[in-house]
Image (tube, rainbow, N blue to C red):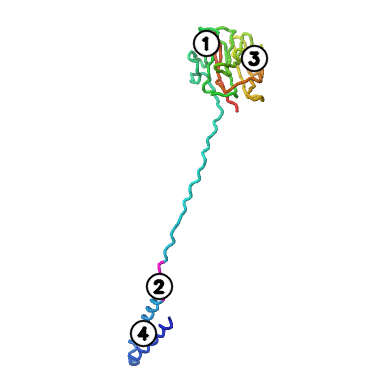
Amino acid sequence: MKQRFLLIFVIALILLNNACGGSGQIDEEVQAAHMAETMVAQTLQASDPTSIPTDTPEPTSTFTVIPPTLTPTVTPTPGPIMVNDDFSENSGIWSGCDDCVWRDGILKIGPYDDPFQAVSIICDECGTTSNYRMAVDATFIDGMAGSPFGFILLITEEFSVTFTIVPSYQRVQLFKNGTKLYNEQKSVVKTGLQKNHLEVVVRDSQTIGRSDITLKINGKTIVVYSGIKVDPTKVGLFIYSETGIAFDNFEFEELR
């Protein structure tokens, strides 16, 4: 195709040369040659599709939405319950204590007009558990000196376990439903108006469904009583109504 147009261009030059009549018309020949060259170039451009500029479309931007990875919510395991009460004021964690008195940094319970009644003061903040450590300072103040006082370790409508001391007789006692499981005289128990530090540790024993109960007085282990059944329940302080007892520095720790 290009050779054909070149031939047309050469013929056009010859014809123009003849028409101009010789060398006297050089300028006109040059102009005619430029015109012929322009015509041929335009003709070649029109006949060659490859020479026609085309607009190349820009690539379309694409993107992929990646859904976020959901991180599972971790629910923390609640820690063990710990309660400390120095009885400097009414902390509001004790139920059954309507007639209790908070004064001079102690909790005073009893004596009451109706004697020989078991009085249980429950620690609501301590929750319900069968594995725990509990401690308190207890001092006989007034009333009948020969009555026991100490801890309630388990209490239901039909079942109770108490750990008590009787300073007048230096007795350490463990009761289940009023029956003495342990009742021994120990010189470590301080008599009269002296303060005694009581501590108890209750843990699951090797026998399924049973517990080991460790009784301590003034820092000394008195006995480890094994095989008693202690279900998860409320715990607290215990007196008999004819006795006036001052409690201080209560501690509770759930064991796991």
Q: Is residue 52 magenta?
A: yes
Lower sequence index among marks 2 and 4: 4
Lower sequence index among marks 3 and 1: 1
Name the kind of residue labelled 4 in the image.
Ala
Q: Is residue 184 above or below residue 73?
A: above
In the picture, the disc for residue 52 is 2
Lower sequence index among marks 4 and 3: 4
Main SS of residues in magenta: loop
Q: Is residue 169 magenta?
A: no
Residue 171 showing in the rendered view:
yes
Secondary structure beneath label 1:
loop
Q: Nearer the viewer, mark 4 or mark 3?
A: 3
| Label 3 sits on residue | 181
| Label 1 sits on residue | 110
Question: In the figure, residue 227 lies in which quadrant?
Answer: top right
Name the kind of residue labelled 3 in the image.
Leu
Tell me where residue 101 appears, x and y as whole percent. 49, 14
Q: Nearer the viewer, mark 2 or mark 4?
A: 2
Secondary structure beneath label 2:
loop
Q: Viewed as shown, does residue 116 lie left or right of 228? A: left
Which residue range is magenta in the image?
A: 48-55
Foreground residue, 2 or 84?
A: 2
Q: Residue furthest front?
A: 158
Name the kind of residue labelled 2 in the image.
Ile
Query: How far separated are the C-alphas under marks 4 and 3?
Result: 135 Å
Residue 142 showing in the rendered view:
no
| Label 4 sits on residue | 33
Name the kind of residue labelled 1 in the image.
Gly
Task: Quadrant for the C terminus, please.
Answer: top right
What's the residue at 44%, 61% (across, down)? 59
Image marks 2 and 4: residues in contact by CB distance under 8 Å? no
Task: Quadrant for the N terminus, please.
Answer: bottom left
